[in-house]
Structures are given as structure tokens and as C-alpha cells.
Amino acid sequence: MPEALQNLIRVLARLPGIGRRTAERMAYRLILRNQALLRDLQSALDRAARELTLCPRCGNLTSVEAVPCRICTDSNRDPAFLCIVEGAPDIQILEQARTFNGHYFCLQGKLSPHQQETITQPILERLLQRIQEDRVTEILLALNSDVESDATAAYLAEHLQPLGLRITRLAFGIPAGSGLAYSDPETLSRALKGRQAL
């Protein structure tokens, strides 16, 4: 197998959710059957590398021409309400709900020793500086529902509670359109604990 093909397979296999076999199929399909898609993919990757960057305030993906990002510069949003997320894609998901009107701070990871992820001291310092600069009064921890995210939430709460802020976390429960029969015990337990009055 040519080295260039092996390299393409190795790179594709590094994408989330893509194993070696899938990477091989993708590489062969791109090279042998779809040269136009290969050129379009190369062009899109080149453009993304040139035109996209991380917002220095929140960590969201933004155009290099719009730094800080449009969310950070939106005067209709409340800077005193800060939502902490694990990654930039989480910001886009929350924005689609169209209910959060504060600002964001992206951790760029979570506490996950087996994946060699951590919250670095510079990120924590940037978060504390942001809280002070924006006079934040409430922090929403919009983290995933897994062991590492729970550890991350506890770590952040330990560092942020002395500041006297209101710290909240997203409620967890049964997804809309789903039924009890399809919910796992942990989801049901969290739904019961997070129940609300009608």
C-alpha cells in the first residue's frame, strides 16, 4: 500500500467515530471513485484552516474577521449570566434551543484521566478573570451527563463556590418524545431528583 494512502487512512481514523476499517473505505472511495469530492474536501479543509479561529473570550469557533465572536459582542445578551460548556459544539447546540441569553465559556475539555484530558491552570485563571471582568452573578454548568463531566462539575464548583455566585447545572431527565420504558435507571433517577412543580 502506498505511503500516501496509508497516511490518509491514519488521518481519517483519527476523526471521532471513525475506526480503521471505515477510514480505509473512505480513503479508497475518495481516491478511486470520487475525485471531485476529494477536491471539495481538500478545499473546504484549507478554507476552514484559513478562515476559522477560536474566540479568545469564550472559545467558540468564529471567523478570523469576527473576533471576538458575535455572541460575545451581542449587546442584547447578559454578560452576568455565564454558561460553561466542555467544547465549542456545545455552544451551537445550546444556541439552537434559543432560550439562553447569556455568555459562554468553553473549557476545551473535561477531567478525564484515561483520555489524558484536564482543566489546565491557564483555563481556570481565564475563567476566574472573565467572572471578575463581566461581574458574573450566575454560572450555568452545561456539561454532559457522564462520570468525567460530573467530576468536572464538582471541580469547578469547588473553585467557584467561594466567589459567592449562584451555580446551577442543566436538569437531566427523560428526552422529549420518549417514554419511561426507553430510559435507563440513571436518567430516571436524575429525572425524579430534578422534578418540578406544576
Image (cartoon, rainbow, N blue to C red):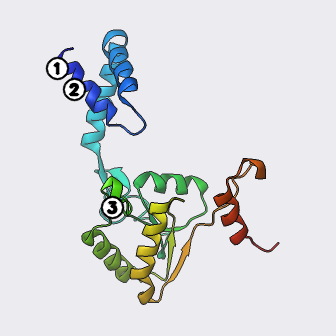
Give the foreground label among 3 and 2.
2
Among the two numbered marks 3 and 2 on one chain, the one whose residue lies closer to the N terminus: 2
x, y percent for residue 130: 35, 76
Marks 1 and 3, the one that precedes in the sequence: 1
Three-letter code for the amino acid on which mark 3 is drawn: Pro
Q: Quadrant of residue 26?
A: top left
Of residue 74 and residue 100, the one placed in the foreground of this image is 100
In the shown orientation, is residue 30 left or right of residue 139? left
Q: Is residue 79 above or below residue 149?
A: below
Residue 68 disc label: 3
Q: Considering the image in quadrants, where does the N terminus appear?
A: top left
* Observer-nearest of 131 and 32: 32
Label 1 to label 3: alpha-carbon separation: 41 Å
Q: Secondary structure at mark 2?
A: helix
Q: From the viewer's perspective, is 2 left or right of 166?
A: left
Residue 56 placement (x, y as % from top left)? 29, 63
In this rendering, the label closer to the viewer, 1 or 3: 1
Is residue 189 placed above or below 8 in the rendered structure? below
Residue 179 in sight here: no
The amino acid pointed to by label 1 is Glu
- In the rendered view of the protein, which quadrant contains the C terminus? bottom right
Residue found at x 70% / y 60%: 188
Q: Residue furthest left?
A: 3
Please name the residue shown 27% across and 32% down the image: 11
Question: How many other residues sit within 10 Å of disc 1, few (<14), some (14-19) or many (≥20)?
Answer: few
Residue 3: which numbered mark, if any? 1
The x and y percentages for residue 31 are 30, 14
Please name the residue that numbered disc 2 is placed on.
Answer: 7
